[in-house]
Structures are given as C-alpha cells and as structure tokens.
Image: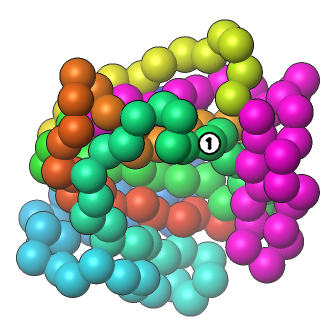
Amino acid sequence: MILDKIENGNKYKCLSGRFAKAFEILKSGELESKEEGKYEVDGAALYYMVQRYVTKPVEERRFESHRRYADIQAVLSGKEAMGYTQVAGLEVTSAYDEEKDIMFFQTPDDYTNLKMNSGEFVVLFPDEAHMPQLQLGGPSQVLKIVFKVLVD
C-alpha cells in the first residue's frame, strides 16, 4: 500500500509502464470534467473509472480485495476514510468472482483507517483488503478516479 499526494505520482512510475501511464493521466488535470463511467487506456490491462458519490457510514460498506489488478484510488475533490488490512485471516463473505476480480470480507475488529483528502491517492496491491468510500467526520461529496492496473 502506498498513500501519497497526486503531485508526487512521478515517484511511482518505476513500478511499471502501466503505473507510469496512469500517473501521467492522473496529473493531466483533464479528469475532473469527465462523466462518470469506465474509460479504457490500454484495453483490459489499464483502465479507470470516474466515480461521484457521498461517503457512507462503516456499517454500509465492506472490505474487498483483488487478485489480478492493483488499484490507484485518487480523491480529486472531497474527503473520505478507507479501511485497510491484509487479506490473510479475513473471513470471506463473497467468494472470489474471477470475471470482476473481486471478493468481499467480514469487517475485522482491527484494521488501519486511512484518511484521504482532495489531491491524495492510495495504491492497493492484489491481496490488500480495503474498504473505500467511508465517512471522515461526516458525509462528503467525493469525486474519485480509480485506475485498475493489471499486475503480471
């Protein structure tokens, strides 16, 4: 897991060419005006989703993880909390869906609470469980970009 400011995205281009392209797009300043939806960059190997939502109480969210993709979740406006923990030892509530590359877990008693403000991103690698879209001091309208980066 990496948590940093979007302006520092260049530091993480070394992860792969796909990460480099994602951070280039993220820093372009062109994403704020995009409509909600999915946008392909390199087919299934790299794409992103534009999301607009109001953050929710922890009781309305659940932990998830992926196996084939890393996430770059960037908050462009608003703020949110995100639960974070390792997958090992978590109780599965929805088995892995290979087509959607996702599985869900029971919320553990102990996890890290990440705080994300406008202009920050988190990189979540496969098998790192996360619970996004949580309220941080109350509901917040959020504009978030989620890149899905295929990890070979």
Q: In this figure, what is the number of numbered marks?
A: 1
Residue 130 showing in the rendered view: yes
The answer to whether 80 appears left or right of 44 in the picture is left
- Please identify the residue farthest to the front as the structure is shown: 59
Q: Secondary structure beneath disc 1? A: loop
Question: Which quadrant is home to the C terminus?
Answer: bottom right
Q: Position of residue 119 (x, y in %)?
A: 17, 41
- In depth, the one of 3 and 19 nearer the eye is 3
Given residues 142 and 16, the one toward you in this image is: 142
Above or below residue 110? Residue 88 is below
Give the dominant element type of the magenta stretch: helix, strand or loop. strand
Q: Which residue corresponds to the image point at 45% horizontal and 51% vertical from the top-left?
A: 72
> What residue sits 28% from the left and 27% below the top?
136
Residue 7 appears in the rendering: no
Tell me where the magenta segment starts and ends, as one range.
Answer: 80-106
Residue 124 in the image: above or below residue 23: above
Amino acid under label 1? Answer: Arg
Residue 130: image x %, image y %? 59, 38
Q: Look at the image and say whether residue 43 sits in the magenta stretch.
A: no
Residue 45 percent location from the top left of the image: 61, 77
**In this view, 49 is above or below 118:** below
Quarter where residue 5 is shown: top left
Residue corresponding to mark 1: 62
Label 1 Cα neighbours within 10 Å, binned few <14 / some 14-19 / many ≥20? some
- For the rendered model, the colour scheme is rainbow
Query: Residue placed farthest to the top in the image?
Result: 110
Residue at the (77%, 40%) spot, across then down? 105
Q: Give residue 69's quadrant in the image.
A: bottom right
Q: Position of residue 131 (x, y in %)?
A: 55, 39
Which residue lies at the image location 23% right of the left edge and 22% below the top edge?
137
In which quadrant is the N terminus drawn?
Answer: top right
Q: Is residue 87 magenta?
A: yes
